[in-house]
Amino acid sequence: MKHIINKLLSIALLFVLSFSTVSSLSATSLNSHVYQSENSDLLNKLLSLNGVSDVKSLESKAFKEKYVLNIEQPINHKNPSQGTFKQRVFVMLTDVNKATVLVTEGYGGAYAERPNYREELSRIFDANIVFVEHRYFLNSTPQPLDWTYLTAENAANDLHRISVEMRKIFNGKWIATGISKGGQNAMLYTMFFPGDMDVTVPYVAPLCKGVEDGRHEPFLNEFAGTQVERQKIKDFQTELLKRRSTLQPMFNKLCADKGYEFNLPLEEIYDYTVLEFSFSLWQWGAPVSDIPALNADDQTLFAYWIKMCSPDYFVKESNTSSFFVQAAKELGYYGYDIKPFKQYLKIKSAKGYLNKIFLPQGLNVKFDKSVYKNMKRFLDKTNNKMMFIYGEFDPWSAVMVDEPKGKNIVVFVEPKGSHRTRIGSLKEDDRKKAVEILTNWLK
């Protein structure tokens, strides 16, 4: 998980972007309609599930029936007496006897309301969908807000409880899948509950070992693209810093006009927005050839920079705050290499920037490396069927799963691919092989 700005919250949008790439793999196309019948067997079964409320029918262009509902979850699964919250779930039907895709979203799930929404694996295998919004995002946020219980283990328990209930309805094989942080969520769920799913397919899922993991910076400096491309990016970033006297006022005006508020001074946010540029460009696979020439006018440079990497990514206490809390606690993140630009920067160091920029005021957390260590051990020993999909030049591939030894684990990497990589965007041979493996797993 910004157009290039909200790269974390808008990972969700990538589901939609992926639809066209997999159309050639699509199974049966279903008629568009809203299923409103009170005699619907699925509706009646949903209403009978434990903890389910607020069931509403939604329009769908891909499914026979589609519903959104809430399911009551313990805030703390280890101690349910501490209270509950409502978690938003979307349910989409093709046939109860076919496979069901459990979308382990890592963020908010509002985009699943769209009538044309369909996840890639559901499209390939004509499968049902149970889509779960992550705790502490959008409609699934506990009140009052206590960050203590925003953990990978509690999120996995949310998914387990939902899958137990939904198995009362759906009889086929089950596939857990998600993109980026949703992919993390899928593999963590499989680690905590290895018996729940038949197949797990994390897309572009990172596995970080620290708040500033340390592997992203050399990846960007030495691996992504060609040496000529990397130098062109670095020269562009340097030019932005050299032109601070004319670009900073434009930057300040943009932030004022948009109403952006930050935890750091604007000249420091300017620095971070420049540092973020290379990560954003490679993450979303933008052509390096589109970068303006260094002698272009201020407006041209500024417009392209902000298009690719807007400062709204760094605003304080946004809809992405829950992710940054998780990153600081146990999921990890990336750092910035300031050495090539140090003479032009206002910041003296980028160390600890996540806590300074993103965490809610007054929240102090210490990173727990146990999630990373436990996942590494699990991947080396598990017999679970897991397929990992990555893009070669996606900076998150710097922290992809590290040659797991599990006998049923396979990894596909799209050459020169980005964070948009999906099965449908793999090379033809790899795409066919991936679908064949999944088909055999689902038999």
Image (cartoon, grey):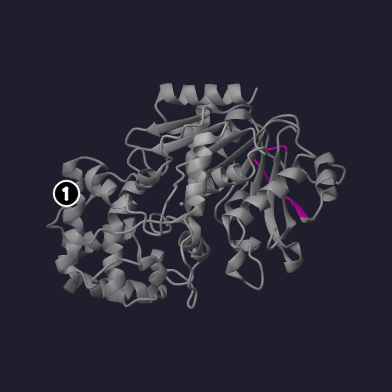
Q: Which residues are magenta?
A: 55-64
Residue 19 point in image, percent of width and height: 51, 38
- Bin the neighbour count of mark 1 within 10 Å (Cα to Cα): few under 14, some 14-19, many 20 and up: few
Q: Quadrant of the C terminus?
A: top right
Tell me residue 39's x, y (percent).
87, 43
Any magenta on residue 416? no
Does 439 sit left or right of 327 as displayed? right
Q: Nearer the viewer, residue 55 or 31?
A: 55
Name the side, left or right, on which 373 lies relative to 54.
left
| 10 horizontally vs 164: left or right | left
Residue at image position (20%, 44%) is 229
Q: Which residue is mark 1?
A: 231
Classify 136 as above or below 363. Answer: above
Extreme residue in the left direction: 295
Which secondary structure lies at badge 1? helix
Image-based side of 427 in relation to 133, left or right: left
Q: How far across and how far down the image is residue 9, in percent? A: 49, 57
Q: Residue at x 73, y 56 (%)?
A: 70
At 76% from the left edge and 39% from the top edge, which residue is drawn? 167
Residue appearing at x 39%, y 67% in the figure: 314
| Three-letter amino acid code at the position of disc 1 | Gln
312 over 289 or under it: above or below:
below
Against 221, is 365 above or below?
A: below
Residue 261 lies in quadrant: bottom left
User: Within the magenta stretch, is there residue 56?
Assistant: yes
Q: Quadrant of residue 174?
A: top right
Residue 437, how many percent across, how many down?
54, 23
